[in-house]
C-alpha cells in the first residue's frame, strides 16, 4: 500500500474488488499528474548518469533509504523492483515535490539534471541487485564492521567514544589514500530506546529541553537570552524563551517561515542591541528587522545578497566581524572533489565569502575550504573567525580529517587539489603544483567523515573555569566510514590562550546504540544565558540541555 498511497483514501471494499493480478494501471505513482508520465528522462541509459546518480544518491538519499535502498522504519524500500515499473517522469515528479508530511523531503533545489541522474540510478537494476545480495540488516554498517578490531589511536570510532577522552590527530598520523576502502554506512536513524540518554562527563547533567521539532539545525542565543533555531527543511526559524523548573522553555514561537532552507542565523550589529536578524537561506542572505523582545519578525525579509546554490552542500552559515564591518558567509562545495577549474558551478563555493553588511562588496575571504557551511564562530577575546569543516569523502576511513580552525584572511585550505598541507588528492594528480606549499594545516584535526557542524565558544559562567572560552562543536556523524565516528559533542580546549593545541575531547556521547543504530545526530550548539549548553539533534528532533551540577 505504501507504493500507491492514494489507495489509503479509498475504502477497503474498493481495493478488494480490484482483481489481484491486475496492475493498478490507472493509478499514478503518489497521485502524480498525468503530465508527469510524459516527462522524458534526458540522461536515460548514459553510464555517466548512473555514476553521478550513485554519488548523488549516497549524498542525499542514503541516510534515509539506506545503502542498498532497503529503507527502514517509515522509509519505504526503493529496491523492491517496483520503481522500475513506474514511469521515470512520475518518479522525477515525486522526488521533486517530496512528501513533507510523511518525511520525504522535496528535492526541487537540486538541479534538474541531477534529479534525473538520481532517477536513473534508483530505477536501475543495480539497487535491486544490491538489495538481493545484502547481508542481514545491520544498522551500524555490517555486523563484521562492528566486530572490527579497535581503531588505532589517535583514530577512534563510536565504540570508543567516551566523555572526557582526549584525542590528537597530527599530519604524521594520516594514512595513504585508499589505505582502506571507501565505506558506505549511512545513519538509518532509529527511535531512541526509553532507557537511553546522551552521556556527559561526571558533574554534568543532560536534560531534554525540547522535542517534536522538525529537523532542528543551527542554534543562536540572542543578547536577551532568547534561543533561535533554524528548522531548515520546514523553512522556518523558531524562538524559545525562558526556562521552567523542569528545564523546558516557557515560551515557543515561530519567528519567521516560508524561507528557503534557512540555516545560518546572525544578529546585527554585534553586541547588546542588535537591530537585524540575518538568515542564510541556501540561495541568499536575507534579513529581518529585530528588536529586543521580538518573538515574531515585525516585517518581511529583505534580500541582502545572492549566494551560489546549484545543489550539493546547502547550509550557509553567517558571522559578523566584532566591529560589524564585515559579514562572513560560508558556502560549501557543490561536489565531493570536482576540479573547480573545470566545473564552473564551483565558482565562489568551498569558500568563506566576505560582504559588507548591506550585501555589497563580495570577495573571497578564504578558499579551498570544502564545507564550512555547518558553522562559523568568532572568538570572544581575539575576534578571530573560526570554522568547522567537512572534508572530502571516498579516500578511505581515516582520510581526510574534518577540522576546526581559525581562518586566515586570504588563506588556502587545499580543496580540491590538496589536503591538510602538501598532500595531493589522488584524483587531482599533477594539478596546481604552485599551491602545494600554500596549503594551511588546520588547527584541530578531527576524525575523518565526522561531519563537524556548528561550533561555539563557551562564554558562560556555569561550567568550571577551565572550560572558559573553549570550543564546543556538534559532530553530526559519518556515512563514509566502515565503523561510525562522530555522533557526539566535542570540546576543543584552548586553555584560555585563544589558540588550539590540536587536541579535542569527547564531551557528550551515546547517540549510537551498541548495535550501531543511530538515534541522535548533533547539529547546532549554543550557550544559553544561564551558562548551560544547548545542542540540537535532527535524529531525535530534540534539543538537549547540558548543565553543570558538580555532582
Ligand atoms: C529524511 C528522510 C528521507 C530522505 C533524505 C529521502 N527520502 Fe525518499 N522517502 C522518505 C519517506 C519517509 C518516504 C515515504 C513518503 C510517503 O509515503 O509519502 C519516501 C518516499 C520516497 C519514494 C517513494 C517510494 C514509494 O515506494 O512510495 C521515492 C521514490 C523516494 N523517497 C526517493 C528518494 C530519493 C531519490 C531521495 C534522495 C534524493 C530520497 N528519497 C531522500 C524519506 C526520505
Image: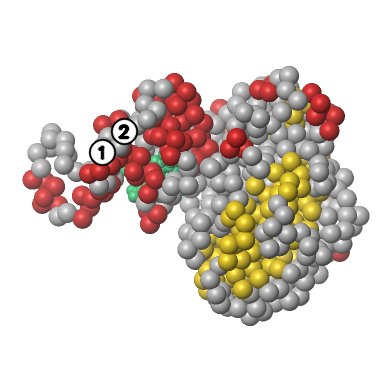
* Location of the N terminus (image quadrant): top left
Question: Residue beneath label 1, please?
Answer: 37
**Which residue bears the numbered disc 2?**
40
Judged left or right of residue 493, residue 287 is: left
Taking the spot 67% from the left edge, 59% from the top edge, the residue there is 359
- Say whether residue 376 is visible: no
Label 2 Cα crowd, 10 Å radius (few <14 / some 14-19 / many 20+): some
User: Within the image, what quadrant is residue 424 found in?
Assistant: top right
Give the alpha-carbon distance from disc 2 to disc 1, as whole Å.
8 Å
129 vs 239, left or right, is left
In x, y percent, where is residue 231?
53, 60
Secondary structure state at the residue bearing disc 2: loop
Residue drawn where x is 41% and y is 22% of the image:
46
Residue drawn at x 47%, y 41% is: 111
Question: Residue 539: percent from the left, percent from the top?
Answer: 53, 52
The answer to whether mark 2 and mark 1 are in CB contact below 8 A is no
In what quadrant of the picture does the C terminus appear?
bottom right
Residue at the spot 44% in from the left edge and 26% down from the top edge: 50
Give above or below for 316 relative to 117: below
Q: Is residue 453 above or below residue 297?
A: above
Amino acid at each position: 500500500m505504501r507504493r500507491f498511497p492514494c489507495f489509503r483514501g479509498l475504502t477497503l471494499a474498493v481495493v478488494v474488488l480490484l482483481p489481484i493480478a491486475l496492475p493498478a494501471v490507472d493509478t499514478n505513482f503518489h497521485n502524480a499528474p498525468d503530465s508527469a508520465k510524459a516527462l522524458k528522462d534526458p540522461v536515460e541509459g548514459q553510464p555517466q548518469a548512473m555514476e553521478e546518480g550513485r554519488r548523488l544518491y549516497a549524498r542525499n538519499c542514503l541516510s534515509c533509504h539506506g545503502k542498498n535502498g532497503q529503507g527502514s522504519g517509515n522509509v519505504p524500500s526503493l529496491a523492491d523492483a517496483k520503481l522500475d515499473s513506474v514511469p521515470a517522469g512520475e518518479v522525477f515528479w515525486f522526488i521533486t515535490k517530496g512528501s513533507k508530511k510523511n518525511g520525504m523531503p522535496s528535492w526541487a533545489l537540486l538541479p534538474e539534471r541531477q534529479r534525473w541522474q538520481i532517477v536513473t540510478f534508483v530505477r536501475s537494476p543495480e539497487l535491486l541487485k544490491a538489495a538481493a545480495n545484502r547481508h542481514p540488516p545491520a544498522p551500524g554498517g555490517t555486523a563484521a564492521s562492528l566486530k572490527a578490531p579497535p581503531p588505532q589511536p589517535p583514530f577512534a570510532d563510536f565504540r570508543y567514544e567516551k566523555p572526557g577522552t582526549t584525542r590528537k590527530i597530527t599530519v604524521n598520523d594520516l594514512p595513504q589514500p585508499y589505505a582502506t576502502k571507501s565505506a558506505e554506512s549511512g545513519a538509518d536513524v532509529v527511535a531512541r530506546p526509553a532507557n537511553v540518554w546522551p552521556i556527559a562527563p561526571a558533574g554534568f547533567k543532560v536534560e531534554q529541553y525540547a522535542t517534536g521539532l522538525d529537523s532542528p539545525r543551527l542554534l543562536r542565543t540572542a543578547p536577551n537570552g532568547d534561543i533561535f533555531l533554524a528548522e531548515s527543511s520546514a523553512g522556518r526559524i523558531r524562538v524559545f524563551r525562558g526556562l521552567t523548573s523542569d528545564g523546558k522553555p516557557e515560551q515557543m514561537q515561530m519567528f519567521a517561515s516560508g524561507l528557503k532552507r534557512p540555516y545560518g542565523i546572525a544578529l546585527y550589529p554585534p553586541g547588546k542591541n542588535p537591530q537585524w536578524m540575518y538568515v542564510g537561506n541556501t540561495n541568499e542572505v536575507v534579513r529581518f528587522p529585530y528588536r529586543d523582545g521580538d518573538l515574531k519578525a515585525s516585517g518581511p525579509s529583505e534580500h541582502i545578497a545572492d549566494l551560489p546554490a546549484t545543489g550539493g552542500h546547502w547550509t550557509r552559515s553567517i558571522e559578523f566581524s566584532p566591529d560589524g564591518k564585515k559579514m562572513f558567509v560560508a558556502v560549501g562545495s557543490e561536489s565531493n572533489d570536482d576540479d573547480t577549474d573545470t566545473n564552473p558551478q564551483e565558482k565562489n563555493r568551498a569558500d568563506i565569502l566576505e560582504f559588507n553588511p548591506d550585501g555589497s562588496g563580495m570577495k573571497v575571504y578564504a578558499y579551498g575550504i570544502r564545507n564550512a557551511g555547518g558553522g562559523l564562530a568568532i572568538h570572544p577575546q581575539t575576534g578571530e573567525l573560526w570554522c568547522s569543516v567537512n572534508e572530502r569523502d571516498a579516500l578511505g576511513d581515516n582520510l581526510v580529517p574534518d577540522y576546526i580552525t581559525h581562518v586566515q584572511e586570504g588563506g588556502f585550505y587545499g580543496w580540491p587539489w590538496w589536503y591538510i598541507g602538501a598532500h595531493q588528492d589522488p584524483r587531482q594528480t599533477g594539478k596546481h603544483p604552485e599551491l602545494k606549499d600554500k596549503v594551511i594545516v588546520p588547527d584541530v584535526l578531527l576524525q575523518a567523515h565526522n561531519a563537524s557542524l556548528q561550533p561555539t565558544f563557551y562564554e558562560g559562567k556555569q561550567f568550571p573555569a577551565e572550560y572558559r572560552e573553549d570550543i564546543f562543536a556538534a559532530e553530526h556523524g559519518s556515512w563514509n566510514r566502515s565503523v561510525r565516528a562522530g555522533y557526539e559533542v566535542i570540546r576543543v580546549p584552548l586553555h584560555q590562550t585563544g589558540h588550539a593545541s590540536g587536541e579535542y575531547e569527547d564531551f557528550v556521547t551515546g547517540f549510537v546504540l551498541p548495535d550501531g543504530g543511530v538515534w541522535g545526530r548533533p547539529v547546532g550548539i549554543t550557550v544559553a544565558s544561564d551558562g548551560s549548553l544547548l545542542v540540537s539533534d535532527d535524529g531525535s528532533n530534540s534539543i538537549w540541555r547540558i548543565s553543570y551540577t558538580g555532582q
